[in-house]
Image (cartoon, helix red, strand yellow):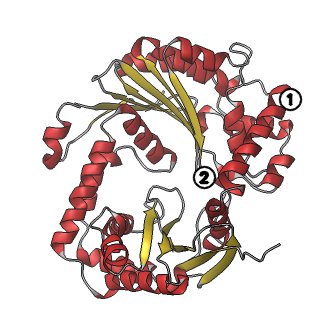
Amino acid sequence: MSGFFLVGSPIPTVFAETQSQLARTTFETTLNNGLKVIIREDHRAPIVMTQIWYAVGSSDESGNLLGISHVLEHMMFKGTQKVPDDEFTRLSRIYGGRINAATYTNYTNYYQLYPKKYFPLALELEADRMRNLVLRQQDFEPEIKVVMEERRQRTDDNPRNLAYERFKWIAYPTSHYRQPVIGFMKNLHNIKLDDLKKWYQTWYTPNNATLVIVGDINAEQALKQVQKYFGAIAKKTTPDRNDVLEFDRLGYRHMELALPVQVPNLYMAWNVRSLATAKNPQDAYALTIIQSLLDGGISSRLQDRLVRDKKILTAINVSYEPYNRGDSLFTISALPSENVSLEQAQSAIEKEMDLFKTELVNQAELERVKNNFVSNLVYSQDDIAGQANMIGNLEVNGLSFRLIDELPQHYDKVTPQDLQRIANIYFVRDNLSTLYLSPESKDKP
């Protein structure tokens, strides 16, 4: 086992009163088999959150196997020789637990929330299915149909989601982030049980996982339990992961679709760096602040100017994910007002984006957004699930959980000049992709 590090969590002065009750203590170690373990004590309630994060997701897939990570996530609840069939789910109900899982582009994670006295059960169950999962045709056949139905409901029968799925293929011309987490229907028909077995044997190994435990536990005692259940699982060599970087300034890309939507939809996406890929981390912090300036509440710029004042739009959403392991997108989706064309809506948004290039953001506006942003960050860590999610997300994307307590200081250092510099680097036409989604013609047969 590698060194066992104790990390005290400094609390920003402005939020000391809010956070004083936490007194959080975090331990980190790596077992000899490569399993990274992060344990955070939080004694406010007699419960424990246990999460395991595997560094494999849809961006690691290729060929005809798109969606296989998500299919395997479903099959992970189908049992082992020791805990057969649906016994995993039944045990969680008996002992007052909550269980779930999720697959994303960069990872697959599983969580179990139990009363503290049943915390070892979570470790026993998770370790068992890390190495002893039984994959059977009789379970696979009905479950792949469940995934297909999920695909139909969430994407194929949802025009906006279907449009955005297609849009990502021009927004990410080379990055594997363009691949849908659930895969295409033809991929789901193509996946076989042997493919799942190989995927499981390749990626589900302790040296490709991070175990996160947060709750009312003693860290040293918890580590002994982790060693008991996970320590004997052998490590494996995992393949290199797919590339999730994107080229700079690929040129303006545009797509138009007609689908059964009620009103026109506009999608805009600029290729940008994430915290993991930016040469200067300040770029990612500045992009996050710009996202909040544009769409951080009722007084944000786009809501105030384009929705309420000029009434060019009826709705708008701005998103940016700074914690990806690869390059990210800065995305805006909008609904134009009646009698406003998609071209006019795009032009109005681009004018607002261009203001960041030519005018320094007012310091008072910047401070308001910073305070709101950091307040939301602090409150998102107020429960053990929020803490575990942030720890796991940072770690699986190649960042450190220690960043959680440093984020307020990093965002506080963002200046108006940083915002102007970033806008001139990223918010240019050659980095932009757009999608015009229009209602289908009523004359269409």
Tell me the distance, in whole angstroms, between the alpha carbons under discs 2 and 1. 26 Å
Camera-side residue: 372 or 236?
372
Q: Residue tagged by mark 2?
A: 105
Which marked residue is nearer to the observer: mark 2 or mark 1?
A: 1
Residue 31, compared with residue 398, is above or below; it is: above
Which amino acid type is marked by label 2? Answer: Thr
Q: SS at mark 2?
A: loop
Which amino acid type is marked by label 1? Answer: Gln
Q: Quadrant of residue 25?
A: top left
Residue 177 circle label? none
Instruction: Indicate the quadrant containing the C terminus: top left, top right, bottom left or bottom right.
Output: bottom right
Q: Who's the residue at 52% across and 56% down the image? A: 325
Q: Is residue 92 left or right of residue 141?
A: left
Q: SS at mark 1?
A: helix
Q: Residue tagged by mark 1?
A: 137
Q: Residue 121: x and y, percent?
A: 53, 15
Q: Reading the chain from its start, which is encountered first: label 2 or label 1?
A: 2
From where the camera sits, is residue 232 visible? Answer: no
Q: Is residue 382 left or right of residue 97?
A: left
Camera-side residue: 412 or 358?
358
Camera-side residue: 431 or 184?
184
Q: Residue 426: x and y, percent?
A: 45, 78
Q: Residue 129: x and y, percent?
A: 66, 24
Residue 413, compared with residue 343, is above or below; it is: above
Q: Are marks 2 and 1 in contact (CB under 8 Å)?
A: no
Camera-side residue: 257 or 414?
257
Q: Who's the residue at 53% across and 80% down the image? A: 431
From where the camera sits, is residue 131 visible? Answer: yes
Q: Who's the residue at 44% across and 40% down the image? A: 389
